Image: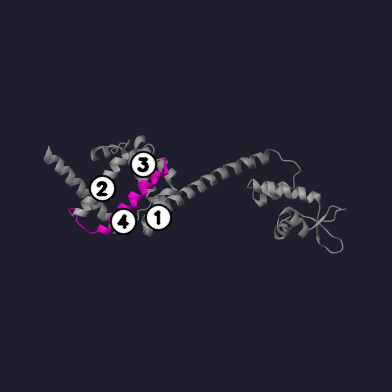
């Protein structure tokens, strides 16, 4: 640094400010921070005014503004209402970014726990569970007004431990479906799988019978308007939470589930 003139070469300025020479060259090329030039050598010469301008750049970067925004504000000596509007937009963006980061961090934690327990996870099952984690809030919003609020609260618990318990149970269920695919509804292990699944659902929803499970909806299935709404809801849920089952596995599961429900109904009728 030239102490008498208070100037820096580009390397001295980089060392003094902690900003790389390459970045300073880039700011110069983009007309964001243009230093003076030595008349004889043509080398860049930075002074105290450039130091203030660099701090201005770094402050705007810290606030998350793009280089285009920064370039615009570097031409201004004062900030007005337009800058406040920019800050409001940036605040909204950063809050959304923070929400996405928090969701990603929680999803990573939950996925690590799944792997530590299972050691190995089918890729389709993992993608399905991760999609569910990623879109939890959207799924909950879609469910509101279609399913009772107490059931929604059970479906989307706030505690991470409860979420992980549900995910482990779903993973075990899907693994079992793939393992037992093709067997009849009368098969002992198939019955055991469905018994365990429905016991888990009833426990999670805090209800006692499968009949109560049919009463968790708040819509009128005879209404065309509600039917269209339900179809749209199912479409969006399938889009955000893809099944890890193949088409054949899915059809088989639907078939044995229907037969399972019919057998329970027949059994209850016989008892009455």
Q: Magenta stretch: give its range.
A: 158-186
For the residues marked 2 and 4, what is the alpha-carbon distance in whole angstroms?
Answer: 13 Å
Residue 175: image tag: 4
Query: Where residue 216 sits in the image (x, y, percent)?
Result: 30, 37
Query: Where residue 265 sits in the image (x, y, percent)?
Result: 17, 42
Q: Which residue in the structure is indicated by mark 3?
A: 155
Give the class, few, some or many, for how many residues have Cα within 10 Å of label 3's Cα (few <14, many ≥20): some
Name the colour scheme: one colour
Query: Where residue 163 sits in the image (x, y, percent)?
Result: 39, 45
49 or 80, which is in the foreground?
A: 49
Magenta stretch, main secondary structure, is helix
Query: Where residue 205 sits in the image (x, y, percent)?
Result: 31, 39
Residue at 61 percent of width and 40 percent of height: 88
Residue 32 visible from this viewpoint: no
Residue 196: image tag: 2
- Label 2 sits on a secondary structure element that is helix
- Residue 215: which quarter of the image? top left
For the residues marked 3 and 4, what is the alpha-carbon distance in whole angstroms?
Answer: 21 Å
For the residues marked 3 and 1, what is the alpha-carbon distance in whole angstroms?
Answer: 24 Å
Residue at 74 percent of width and 41 percent of height: 78
Do labels 1 and 4 touch, CB within 8 Å? no
- Label 1 sits on a secondary structure element that is helix
For the residues marked 2 and 1, what is the alpha-carbon distance in whole angstroms?
Answer: 23 Å
Spot the residue most to the bottom. 41
Q: Earlier in the sequence, mark 2 or mark 1?
A: 1
For the residues marked 3 and 2, what is the alpha-carbon distance in whole angstroms?
Answer: 17 Å
Q: Earlier in the sequence, mark 3 or mark 4?
A: 3
Give the class, few, some or many, for how many residues have Cα within 10 Å of label 4's Cα (few <14, many ≥20): some
């Amino acid at each position: 640094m030239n102490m008498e003139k208070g100037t820096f070469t580009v390397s001295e300025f980089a060392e003094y400010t902690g900003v790389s020479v390459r970045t300073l060259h880039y700011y110069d090329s983009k007309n964001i921070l243009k230093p003076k030039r030595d008349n004889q050598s043509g080398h860049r010469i930075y002074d105290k005014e450039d130091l203030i301008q660099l701090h201005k750049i770094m402050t705007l970067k810290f606030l998350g503004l793009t280089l285009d925004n920064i370039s615009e504000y570097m031409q201004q000596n004062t900030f007005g209402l337009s800058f406040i509007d920019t800050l409001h937009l940036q605040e909204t963006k950063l809050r959304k970014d923070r929400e996405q980061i928090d969701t990603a961090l929680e999803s990573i934690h939950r996925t690590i726990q799944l792997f530590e327990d299972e050691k190995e996870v089918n890729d389709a099952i993992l993608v399905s569970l991760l999609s569910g984690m990623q879109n939890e809030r959207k799924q909950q919003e879609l469910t509101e007004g279609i399913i009772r609020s107490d059931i929604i609260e059970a479906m989307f618990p706030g505690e991470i431990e409860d979420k992980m318990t549900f995910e482990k149970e779903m993973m075990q269920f899907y693994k079992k479906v793939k393992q037992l695919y093709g067997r009849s509804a009368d098969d002992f292990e198939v019955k055991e799988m469905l018994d365990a699944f429905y016991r888990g659902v009833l426990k999670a929803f805090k209800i006692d019978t499968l009949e109560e499970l049919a009463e968790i909806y708040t819509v009128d299935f005879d209404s065309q308007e509600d039917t269209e709404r339900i179809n749209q809801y199912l479409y969006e849920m399938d889009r955000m939470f893809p099944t890890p089952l193949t088409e054949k596995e899915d059809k088989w599961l639907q078939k044995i589930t229907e037969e399972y429900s019919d057998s329970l109904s027949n059994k209850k009728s016989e008892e009455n």
